[in-house]
Amino acid sequence: MNNNFNNEDWNNQNQYNFNYDNQGYYKEIIVQPRKKRGGRLITYLSLVLVTSLVTSFAVGGVMYSKFSQQLDSYALKQTSTVSSSNNGTTSPTQLSASVDDIKATNLFSTSTDNLTVAEIAKKVGPSIVGIKMSVQSTRQSAFYGSRSSTSDSEGSGIIFTKDGYIITNYHVVQYADPKSGASNSTLTVYLPDKREAKATFIGGDSDNDLAVIKIDLTNLPVAELGDSSEVEVGDPAVAIGNPLGMEFAGSVTYGVISALNRQLDTGDNSMSLIQTDAAINPGNSGGALVNSKGQVIGINSAKISVTGVEGLGFAIPMNTAKPIVEQLKEYGYVKGKPLMGISAQEVTENYSRMYGLPVGIYISEVSAGGAAEAAGIKKGDVLIKLAGSKIETMSDLDAVKKKHKAGDTVDAVVSRDGTQVSVKITFTEDK
């Protein structure tokens, strides 16, 4: 029985995602098995984190994952509905017209509370900024010696305090985070009034794709943050940001709220997002999704990009973002998040058969002084149960951790040399 992982096999069959602790060490190593594409319609969709890449060196990226069963079902139903026009029940033209009617009725309502799209743009636009992330790297060449290159990416941000604190997506500014290991990075913020300012990374939460940065300017226009719990399907929605970078800064698109609580699997996390058909494109990341009162009810983050599919954009609900952003602003991290102190890899059914290990989470490293070490967990153990829940994937592990906070003690079961060992883990704080 060979319990040693073959690194080449592992690399060839998986995609890696890394999380870091506050000292730059890997906090969790998350392996996402590569998916095989079948012939089924819309089985796998391409989830694009909408950051605009300026150079060929990617900062941010595209992740492939199986989308929620609800969305899969919804897409197939829509295909079926359009196809049924052959039977005379409905037509694509009728569907389009009904959607346009909804947009017109809601967005241009005569209610005193609602604003027109132009009024929303005037109210919110001045507080939406462009963000440029530049990372400089040096490569050694046998022929040319040391050569430097710079990779840039652009996104959007929302000013939420007069003294220069800005909300954005973590994936827009992740290489400004000391945990990323990037040693030479700069952040530049572009304001709608044509001013530019260098920005400082304050804090980020990769689990929720949120970050806070700051510029040293005062008396800035501030966006009004709304209550996303009041949002309903069919409500008007306006997206404001910088699609494709600063060349199209301050672009405004509108549509409706298509769905609420969409569960998106980004490979290492599952997020509950607002779905909208307002056009969201690369560069819109970190920009505002706004209601008819001119209040920011979401932070634009991603879109589904696949041939034949349009109008599937997603935003982080403001009620999810606001408490996280407040903690990032004050502490630089989200207080109370539990940490096990391990580096781990998924043992799938295939690897279970290959290496004679149980399906679960293989512990490849145990951090000194961490919760796992204190519990007696060792390198080479396979975590199979935590807090009474069966653990087979990193998503399973994350789901259990999200139900607990630092200081909580839970039961765990690991497989060690074929024997199940029960331990108790007291989570430490992930700073």
Image: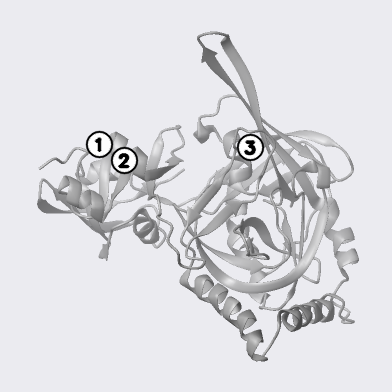
Q: Position of residue 91 (x, y in %)?
A: 71, 83
Which residue is depicted at the point 62% across and 18% down?
Answer: 148
Disc 3 is placed on an element classified as strand
Location of residue 143 by image quarter = top right
The residue under label 3 is which amino acid type? Phe
Viewer-closest of 264 and 397: 264
Q: Nearer the viewer, residue 135 or 83?
A: 83
Q: Secondary structure at mark 1?
A: loop
What sort of colour scheme is used for the picture?
Answer: one colour
Chain-order first, disc 1 or disc 3: 1
Mark 1 vs mark 3, foreground winner is 1
Q: CA distance from mark 2 to mark 1?
A: 6 Å
Instruction: Write down the residue under mark 3.
Output: 201
Taking the spot 42% from the left edge, 59% from the top edge, the residue there is: 402
Q: Residue at x 50, y 35 (%)?
A: 179
Dot label at residue 39: none
The residue lying toward the viewer, choosing from 340 and 76, is 76
What amino acid is found at the position of numbered circle 2 in the picture?
A: Trp
In the picture of the structure, the residue carrying the numbered disc 1 is 6
Establish if 141 lies above or below 66. above
Query: Could you tell me if residue 13 is visible in this image?
Result: yes
| Mark 2 Cα-neighbour bin, 10 Å: few <14, some 14–19, many ≥20 | some
Q: CA distance from mark 2 to mark 3?
A: 34 Å
Where does the image place residue 103, in percent across and percent down from the top left? 79, 76
Q: Where residue 357 sits: x, y (%)?
A: 17, 49
Q: Secondary structure at mark 2?
A: helix
Tell whether label 3 touches label 1 (CB within 8 Å): no
| Residue at image location 83% in from the left, 51% down from the top | 250
Inter-mark Cα distance, 1 to 3: 38 Å
Q: How many marks?
A: 3
